[in-house]
Image (cartoon, grey):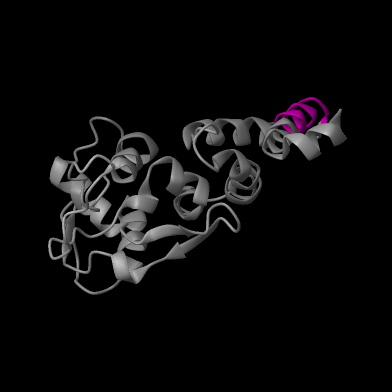
Amino acid sequence: RREAMAVNQPRQLVNVDLIENKVYRAIYSNRQLEEILVDFWVNHFNVFNGKGPIRLLLTSYERDAIRPRVLGHFKDLLLATAHHPAMLIYLDNVQSQVPREDFPQPIGPNGVPARRPGINENYGRELMELHTLGVDGGYTQEDVIAVARAFTGWTVYDPERYGEFQFNPAVHDRKEKLVLGHVLPAGRGEQDGLDVIDIL
C-alpha cells in the first residue's frame, strides 16, 4: 500500500507519514511533555495543509521550525515560523510586495483590469493578533500595515522544488516604518522584519 501511494500519490504520502509519525511519537515517546508542547505550538502557529505546496512543507515545518524550539525562547520560535515557507505561503506573504504605481495596470483573463501587486496584510495581522499580542493587544490598523510593509520581500524560493526562505530586496518596502511607536529607519531590508520580531 505504501509503495503504491509513493508512486501514485507522493504528496498524500508525505501527509500520511506526518500523521502516522505524530501518533507514534505521542504514544511511544519517552518525552511526553515535549510532544504536548510540539502539538500546542503547531496549533498556535497554525498552517493549513490543504493550501498549495504546504502539504509538502508541513513535515519540515514541525520538524525544523517548531520541534527544536519548544523548550527554548519564544522569540526563536516566532522567528523560525516567520522564516518557514509553510507560514509564508499560508498567510500569503510570498505575494506581499511594495506597491509599484509606475508599473502598467495588469489585465486579467477577460480583459478586466487585475489587481496590482502590493502589500498583503495577512501575515502582519496574524503575527500581532494570534501569534503575539492578541485581539486587544493595543495595536492599530496602521501598525498592521507597517508590519506588513516590514515583511515585504520575505518570500519562498521555488516553492514546488526547493521551498526555502528567501529575502527578495527588489520587492521590499525600503521606506521608514512606525511599528507600535518604534521607528524602523529606511533602507534596511530584511532587518525590518527581524526588528518587528524583537519588538513583539
Task: Tell me where residue 60 appears, x and y as whole percent.
Answer: 63, 48
Which residue occupies the extreme bottom position in the image?
187
* Figure quadrant of residue 9: top right
Magenta segment:
19-28
- How many numbered discs? 0
**Residue 80 vs residue 172, the one in the foreground:** 172
Q: Quadrant of the N terminus?
A: top right
Q: Residue at x 60, y 56 (%)?
A: 161
* Figure quadrant of residue 42: top right
Q: Is residue 64 toward the left or the right of residue 120 in the image?
A: right
Name the magenta segment's main secondary structure: helix
Task: Tell me where residue 75 appears, x and y as whole percent.
Answer: 45, 52
**Residue 20 vs residue 111, the one in the foreground:** 111
**Residue 140 vs residue 16, the one in the foreground:** 16
Magenta-span inclusion, residue 99: no
Task: Tell me where residue 190 appears, x and y as whole percent.
Answer: 36, 67
Task: Tell me where residue 30 appears, x and y as whole percent.
Answer: 81, 34
Q: Residue at x 66, y 46 (%)?
A: 63
Q: Is residue 180 toward the left or the right of residue 38 in the image?
A: left
Q: Residue at x 46, y 64 (%)?
A: 166
**Residue 161 vs residue 81, the one in the foreground:** 161
Q: Is residue 113 toward the left or the right of residue 154 in the image?
A: left
Q: Is residue 43 above or below residue 167?
A: above
**Can residue 31 be seen in the rendering of this structure?**
no
**Can residue 86 be seen in the rendering of this structure?**
yes
Q: Is residue 12 toward the left or the right of residue 113 in the image?
A: right
